Image: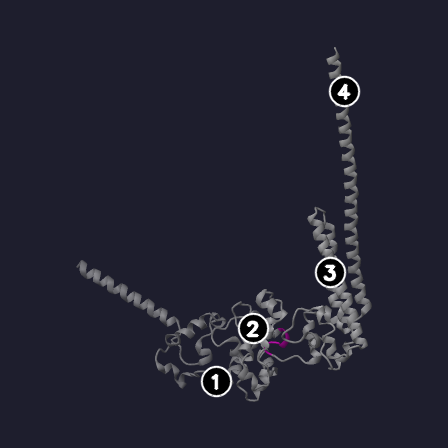
């Protein structure tokens, strides 16, 4: 009897475990039985977390573990052709009542159709980027997720999947080295090496869903979103009128496009010679501007070295350090003001920097002179003290000698 009871309990436990496993299996779509790798990717996606399943895009019957799940009668669509992907995604993402709860805009599809990608797509070109090329097919993550394909850190790499493909780009007469140039640019290094998430990336200039290269007369607004003060200075310059007429670009004519380097005064007057003749009034002005800026830079650099040297000698340089920082702030301001090409304004800031430098160096010299005077004064005092001590010693010595003589006579 006891043996029968044990067998009964074992069978009951086995059936219970089998039922639990079966229920667990039923809670997942049958798709993952065959497509396990894709299923694992999909489980990480934002769609999976919002209870969107395989059949939402592919159709079929997620509870049917037989091949009948793929039947047309059950609405199975299979692999989605590239030509149908944007409209499929728009089925949900253009639905206001559906997207409102997530705070997601519903104009992405409309914007996409206005992009260079979308315009070519409407002409029947299915080689251009569609939703899944940027967001992936199954492991779709939000842009604020650091590992997302469209996060600020990764979006340039995502764009390069197509734009670094030489064979693909040759068909559109486009270069394939933009990503390589971007990585070496000041923007790319700031973002990819220094982790500065405010630095520009592809979508900062070209847009995301409505991606288009900015026109010549649009550059000032694109760059000006970050460099607003520089744009305001440029508007006051002689370059503004030719820029408005499309004869030059506000920014890229001097700073280039994807391979933008850290701004340096060394580009003057070389970059100016692209448009202006050597010996012209414009080149003379460029030389004058460069001379003012390099002069101020040199003065502040020498002043900094003087302050360091003074600090090593024990001089309290706190106030001078503050003044030097203020002068360097003027120098940073000068880097922006130079875009006006107004020599008088540039001289104003360079003269301020030079004046501060002269004051600091003069102050250091005065302190050194004061130290020299005090040092000489101390030397004189110590010499006097030593002389007095010596005289007292000699006097004492004579007195003791006289005493000794008196004692010997007695």
Span of residues in magenta: 204-209
User: Looking at the image, is 374 positioned above or below residue 199?
Assistant: above
Viewer-side residue, 262 vs 95: 262
Horizontal side of 340 relative to 214 (left or right) equals: right
Residue hosting label 2: 155
Earlier in the chain: of badge 3 and badge 1, it is: 1
Q: Position of residue 145 (x, y in %)?
A: 53, 67
Residue hosting label 4: 399
User: Looking at the image, is 116 positioned above or below residue 21?
Assistant: below
Q: Is residue 352 visible?
A: yes
Earlier in the chain: of badge 1 and badge 4, it is: 1
Look at the numbered disc 2 and give the secondary structure of its residue. helix
- Disc 1 to disc 4, C-alpha distance: 122 Å
Q: Which mark is residue 329?
A: 3
Nearer mark to the viewer, of 2 and 4? 4
Nearer mark to the viewer, of 4 and 3? 4
Residue hosting label 1: 81
Q: Position of residue 114 (x, y in %)?
A: 61, 83
- Disc 3 to disc 1, C-alpha distance: 57 Å
User: Looking at the image, is 24 positioned above or below residue 276?
Assistant: above
Neighbour tally class for label 2: few under 14, some 14-19, many 20 plus, Cα within 10 Å: some
Earlier in the chain: of badge 4 and badge 3, it is: 3
Residue placed at 70% from the left, 77% from the top? 253
């Amino acid at each position: 009897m006891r043996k029968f009871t044990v067998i009964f309990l074992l069978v009951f436990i086995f059936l219970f475990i089998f039922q639990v496993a079966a229920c667990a299996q039923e809670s997942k779509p049958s798709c993952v039985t065959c497509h396990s790798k894709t299923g694992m990717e999909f489980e990480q996606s934002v769609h999976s977390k919002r209870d969107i399943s395989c059949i939402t895009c592919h159709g079929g019957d997620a509870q049917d573990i037989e091949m009948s799940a793929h039947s047309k009668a059950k609405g199975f669509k299979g692999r989605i052709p590239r030509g149908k992907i944007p409209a499929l995604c728009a089925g949900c993402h253009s639905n206001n009542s559906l997207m409102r709860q997530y705070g997601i805009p519903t104009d992405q599809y409309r914007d996409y159709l206005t992009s260079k990608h979308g315009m070519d797509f409407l002409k029947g070109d299915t080689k251009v980027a569609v939703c899944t090329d940027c967001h992936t097919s199954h492991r779709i993550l939000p842009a604020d997720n650091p590992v997302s394909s469209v996060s600020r850190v990764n979006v340039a790499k995502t764009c390069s999947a197509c734009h670094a493909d030489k064979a693909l780009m040759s068909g559109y007469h486009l270069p394939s080295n933009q990503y390589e140039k971007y990585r070496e640019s000041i923007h790319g290094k700031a973002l990819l090496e220094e982790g500065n998430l405010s630095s520009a990336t592809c979508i900062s200039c070209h847009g995301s869903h409505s991606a288009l290269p900015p026109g010549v007369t649009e550059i000032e607004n694109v760059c000006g979103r970050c460099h607003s003060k520089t744009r305001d200075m440029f508007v006051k310059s002689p370059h503004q009128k030719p820029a408005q007429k499309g004869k030059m670009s506000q920014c890229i004519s001097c700073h280039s496009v994807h391979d933008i380097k850290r701004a340096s005064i060394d580009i003057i007057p070389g970059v100016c010679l692209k448009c202006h003749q050597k010996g012209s009034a414009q080149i003379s002005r460029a030389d004058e501007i460069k001379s003012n800026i390099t002069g101020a830079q040199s003065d502040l650099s020498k002043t900094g070295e003087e302050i360091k040297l003074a600090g090593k000698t024990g001089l309290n340089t706190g106030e001078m350090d503050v003044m030097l920082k203020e002068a360097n702030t003027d120098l940073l301001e000068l880097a922006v003001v130079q875009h006006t090409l107004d020599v008088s304004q540039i001289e104003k800031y360079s003269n301020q920097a030079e004046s501060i430098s002269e004051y600091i160096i003069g102050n250091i010299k005065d302190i050194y002179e004061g130290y020299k005077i005090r040092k000489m004064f101390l030397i004189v005092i110590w010499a006097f003290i030593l002389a007095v001590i010596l005289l007292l010693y000699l006097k004492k010595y004579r007195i003791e000698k006289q005493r000794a003589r008196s004692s010997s006579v007695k």
